[in-house]
Amino acid sequence: MTISLNLLRHLLDGKFHSGERLGSLLGVSRSAIWKGLQGLKDQGVTIHAVRGRGYRIPHALELLEQDLIMEGLRPLTATVSFRMEVLLDIDSTNTYLRQTVPLGSNDVVACLAERQTQGRGRRGRQWVSPFAQNLYLSISYPLAVPLEALGGLSLSMGVAVNTALQEAGLSSAGLKWPNDVYWQQQKLAGILIEIDGESSGPCRAVVGVGINFDMRDADTAAIDQVWTDLVRAMASEGREPPSRNSLAGIVLRCLVQGLETFEKNGFSAVHDEWKRWDLCDGRPVMLRIASQEIVGLGRGVDEHGALLLETEGAIRSYHAGEVSLRLCP
Ligand code: BTN
């Protein structure tokens, strides 16, 4: 991949570059350039080749760079044992961390990838993860919390991601229980949390976050829900989006801070923020539990993060994991 990666760095501006010039810049033959371009195509990078003009990628791209991401994290890395891996290509950043970080390790480990070949969403769904257009990242975090106290973790992580998006300049995103981030009724980000461990032993959470950043329409046919991305949302709010690297740093910092807060004080520490961003409160929603559908009025969440739903004058609570939820139009 080294030639391909060096080649890609010369193509990031989205302009045409001749094979001859690329060869002389990298000090390799034109056939090595051709092989490098094939390698990029295998990674899911679209390459346009035009006779007499050369090669280009269809849009300028910013690659993830560890040093730039670390800048957004700096206040934090002094206090926790933190390390990060930035990968070009992986099946799923969640799966990777669960396979490579031993249970019982005290390290907080983050993994970001430019592309996921088997990105996973909640409830067994696929998470469409094309090359270098969005953010796909996960954190493995050792949790000194009994398994039964983990109820509000999903919601706390939703609050952390929305806090990061606000810090990055987006003003009007909201949260759909348990932790989907929506902007004007379109999904902007999703979170997949996987817990490893046993009630009596060490326990860790792998928190995976996908944020649609600058999704190109050609890649979106497989997405089965209404979506938007940060570039579009911020353009509608009349703002400039942050760079992908700076957003990644902010998101990682907010996640680690959110995990620390959750470990100390549980979901109740961010209950007020949740209320501020809750898209279900006071609105008709539909819950699906196995094959049963229940329509009711959202009544916020309790101190453990369970959804409160009013049906026929009574309010009942529902826990994440048991149910899926849709906002009614
Ligand atoms: C959802 O369904 O809303 C959750 C989507 C979570 C996607 C992220 S992308 C990084 C991490 N790796 C995965 O395979 N999934 C999560």
Image (cartoon, helix red, strand yellow):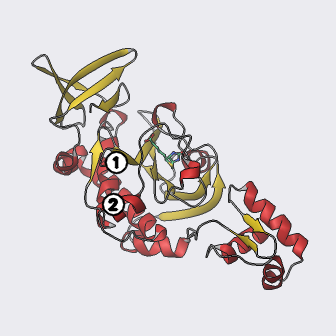
Quadrant of the rendered image containing residue 242: bottom left
Q: Is residue 286 above or below residue 155?
A: above
Kindly identify the residue that appears in the image at 84 percent across and 83 percent down.
Answer: 27
Residue type, mark 1 in image? Val
What residue occupies the far left of the structure in this picture? 313
Please give left or right for residue 156 compared with residue 190 in the image. Answer: left
Real-space Cα separation, disc 1 to disc 2, in angstroms = 10 Å
- Dot 1 alpha-carbon crowd within 10 angstroms: few under 14, some 14 to 19, many 20 or more: many
Please give left or right for residue 125 compared with residue 313 in the image. Answer: right
Q: Is residue 167 above or below residue 92?
A: below
Q: Quadrant of the C terminus?
A: top left
**Residue 129 seen in the figure:** no
Q: Is residue 223 above or below residue 18?
A: above
- Dot 2 alpha-carbon crowd within 10 angstroms: few under 14, some 14 to 19, many 20 or more: many
**Residue 10 seen in the figure:** yes
* Pointer 1 with pointer 2, Cβ within 8 A: yes
Nearest to N terminus: mark 1 or mark 2: 2
Which is nearer the eye, 146 or 299? Answer: 299
Image x and y of residue 173, in percent: 28, 53
Judging by the rendered image, the residue that carries numbered circle 2 is 165
Residue type, mark 2 in image? Leu
Secondary element at image label 2: helix
Image x and y of residue 108, in percent: 47, 58
Which is nearer the eye, 204 or 89? Answer: 89
Kindly identify the residue that appears in the image at 54 percent across and 56 percent down.
Answer: 216
Image x and y of residue 89, in percent: 65, 55
Judging by the rendered image, the residue that carries numbered circle 1 is 181
Please give left or right for residue 254 compared with residue 225 in the image. Answer: left
Please give left or right for residue 12 compared with residue 279 in the image. Answer: right
Kindly identify the residue that appears in the image at 42 percent across and 66 percent down.
Answer: 247
